[in-house]
Each structure stands twice: as structure tokens, then as C-alpha cells.
Amino acid sequence: MKELVFGHKSPDTDAVVAAKAFSYLQNQLGYDTEAVALGELNDETKFVLQHFEEPAPRIISAAKPEVDAVMLVDHNEAQQSVADLKDVQITHVVDHHRIANFETAAPLYYHAEPLGCTSTILFKLFKQNEVTVPAKLAGLMLSAIISDTLLFKSPTTTPEDEAAVKALAEIADVDYQKYGLEMLKAGTNLASKTEQE
Amino acid sequence: MKELVFGHKSPDTDAVVAAKAFSYLQNQLGYDTEAVALGELNDETKFVLQHFEEPAPRIISAAKPEVDAVMLVDHNEAQQSVADLKDVQITHVVDHHRIANFETAAPLYYHAEPLGCTSTILFKLFKQNEVTVPAKLAGLMLSAIISDTLLFKSPTTTPEDEAAVKALAEIADVDYQKYGLEMLKAGTNLASKTEQE
Ligand SMILES: [Mn+2]
Ligand SMILES: [Mn+2]
Ligand SMILES: [Mn+2]
Ligand SMILES: [Mn+2]
């Protein structure tokens, strides 16, 4: 039975990428899932998807019309999630935030770690399940980690986040320092502002 | 900084054993933890600890007088936990129940799977972290899985629970079928009742 996978409302790069990465992993493991988003993508995320020639996810405003069960990434609090969350079963959560306003009727898979980015946790799950990360997905995942950690400048950054970016950069064949600065710039619209001056 | 690890109030065998197993694993990984219990042990758990010559855990009624942070196993709901849970930080949870009445102020490690027993999840974590399960602990962990699954008769039993018992039985060198029936009997007090007749 198909399930939808999505990150939080007002999606950032991790919310979009972690949904794509977890959906890919779960499909490799035998689930039938689709990664979707809960709102318009920001400029940084658009830059990332264009750079790696990845299509933007479909945007949904409700889950129950399509599925009975969902998987959450990069969030768990109900107010950050799909409007009709209470009408569907949550079978999986992968997240790096505190837990609050979250309740289920049944046991579930819940994997959270206090790391800088959901995509860092997902990279560990790929390794644990011995699923190879495709080059394009590796590019997306390192983008999410650079986004959440501000290229390792954020106080939430851990050594695991840095190690994941370095390993993913080898898979994606990306100069992550150079690319990361371009990506963060795209998010702040510095590029277009500079052009106008 | 030391942390206490404990299962739910009115402890069953999984609550006691999972605390011991997770505490052992975390100490191997560099944490300083002590497994404790939130109440008197039941007859089944006493039988298990005697069989494998393992001391009973210390019983606590409050955490904050001793520590600032705790790790929960085999439960997450506040009403099943230590009375002063709100006064300490929860840094880790390993569980196989639904999530409810659970909230943290900070990100944490939370690993739940819809399996028959917390000790089955812990066995996977030992393998993922490449930590060897000592023979005595293997005996305790297979006891917890047999207890929670009623020797694989409970509808919550999964193939992973059965596989874990078989692997743990090899490490512990235990005939799990014979031992499991004795253990379940000890829990129901059938043995002592038969003696009296
Ligand atoms: Mn996010
Ligand atoms: Mn994130
Ligand atoms: Mn229990
Ligand atoms: Mn249990």
C-alpha cells in the first residue's frame, strides 16, 4: 500500500531532500512510497534541484485523499506537518529535532539523533541497510547538510555531519566547499542582488 | 556525567533486561550509565536473574537527586516513567511501543521499531555498533524476548524477534524452548502451585 513521505511545511532543503532520500531508501527496501512537499520550495532548494537536474516534488495540502499511511522526515510536531495528519497512520519518522506534539495510536519506526541534519542520519541508514547512494542523490544530501549546518558554521554541526558531507562529495564528485558557498548564496539571493547593483 | 537507564514502572522482564543491555552498550560506547528499575521485580524476572546469576538492579523512585539526564527503555509515556521525569533531560530512548505523552525540550536519540520486544532492537544496535553481547547478557536478552512474545505466540511477534532469540541462544548456549517454558512457568507461579498440590 502506497505511502507518502514528506518534510515540514515551509520546506527547507533538508525537508525536501530527506523526503527524496528516505523514499528512495524505503523503495529499495520494498516499500511503495512517493516523496512530496508541503509547500513551495525556497530559492536555495530550487538551486539545488536545478544543479543536480532533479525534478521538484509534487506539492500536497492533504494526505488522506491519497493514502492511509505516511512517513515524516525532518519534523515530528503536528503543527509543522500536513493538515490532516490525525487522519492517517504515521509508520516512520526520521528526524533531528526535539519531540513534541507528537502522538501515535500504534507502534512505529522512529529514528532520531541529535545531529545537524536529517540527511546525515539518512546517510547512516543507507550504510546500515547496505543500500548504495546514487551520485545525484549524494549531491542532494550533501546540499541538505551544508544548508542545515551553514557549511559547518552552525553550532548544531557535529563531526558526523562533516564526515557525511565529505563521503557524499566523493560519491557525487563535487567540490563541496565551492559548491556549498554558491548554494548558500543562491538561498540568500545575494547573486541576484549583486547583479542589480 | 553519569546517566540512569530504566524501563517502565511495574517492570516486566524486558523493562529490566533492556535497561541492563542498553546501559552495557552505552558504557562500551563511552557513556557512564547505570541500569536501575522503577519498582519491585516480578517472579518471572527474579527467575531470569537467578538463572543467569545476575544481580537485581537498584530500585529508584526519583532521578533528579542523582543525575541530570536519563535514558528510557521499553517505554516513553510520562505516566509510565519516573515520577520526576520532567526535572531531568531525556537523552536516549529505545522502545517498541506507540509514542504518547512524550515531549522533550532538546533533540535526542530516539530509536523505536514495531518489533515484539525492546531487547530485539537492542540486539540490532549491538550488531550495528559492532559490540559483542556477553554470554550472560545474551541469556537475559533472549529471556526478555521470550517473555514479551510469549515464546513467539503473541501476535506482536515478528521474524526479527525469532531470529534474535535463536542467535542469542547460541551465544548463551541455552536450549531456548526448554528454558523459555520454564521461565514462563516461573512467571505464572505454576511451579510453586504444583508443588503445593
Ligand atoms: Mn528543516
Ligand atoms: Mn533538518
Ligand atoms: Mn515492558
Ligand atoms: Mn517490551
Image (tube, coloured by chain):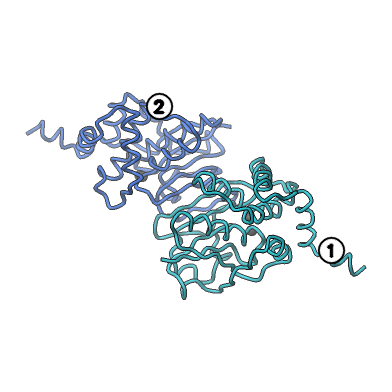
Chain colours: A cyan, B blue
Q: Quadrant of the N terminus of chain A?
A: bottom left
Q: Is residue B22 above or below residue A40?
A: above
- Say what secondary structure mark 2 lies in: loop
> What residue is shown at x 30% (from left), y 27% (from top)?
B173
Name, please, the residue furthest toward the bottom. Answer: A65
Chain under callout 2: B
List the residue tagged with mark 2. B134
- For the residue pair A168 and B49, the one nearer the viewer reads as A168
Q: Quadrant of the C terminus of chain A?
A: bottom right
Quadrant of the image where one finds ligand 1? bottom right
Q: Is residue B87 left or right of residue B11?
A: right
Q: Is residue B16 left or right of residue B42?
A: right
> Disc 2 marks which amino acid?
Pro
Q: How many marks?
A: 2
- Residue B191 in percent (x, y) is at 15, 33
Q: Is residue A65 above or below residue A185?
A: below
- For the residue pair B102 and A118, the one nearer the viewer reads as A118
Q: Is residue B56 left or right of residue A90?
A: left
- For the residue pair A176 and B177, the one nearer the viewer reads as A176
Name, please, the residue furthest toward the left. Answer: B197
Q: Is residue B94 above or below residue A19?
A: above
Q: Is residue B99 left or right of residue A73?
A: left
Q: Which mark is residue A191?
A: 1
> Disc 1 marks which amino acid?
Ala
The CB of the residue at mark 1 lies under 8 Å from ligand 1? no
- Say what secondary structure mark 1 lies in: helix
> What residue is shown at x 32% (from left), y 38% (from top)?
B165
Q: CA distance from mark 1 to mark 2?
A: 58 Å
CB contact under 8 Å: marks 1 and 2: no
Judge the density around disc 2: few (<14), some (14-19), many (≥20) Cα neighbours within 10 Å.
few
Chain under callout 1: A
Q: Which mark is residue A110?
A: none
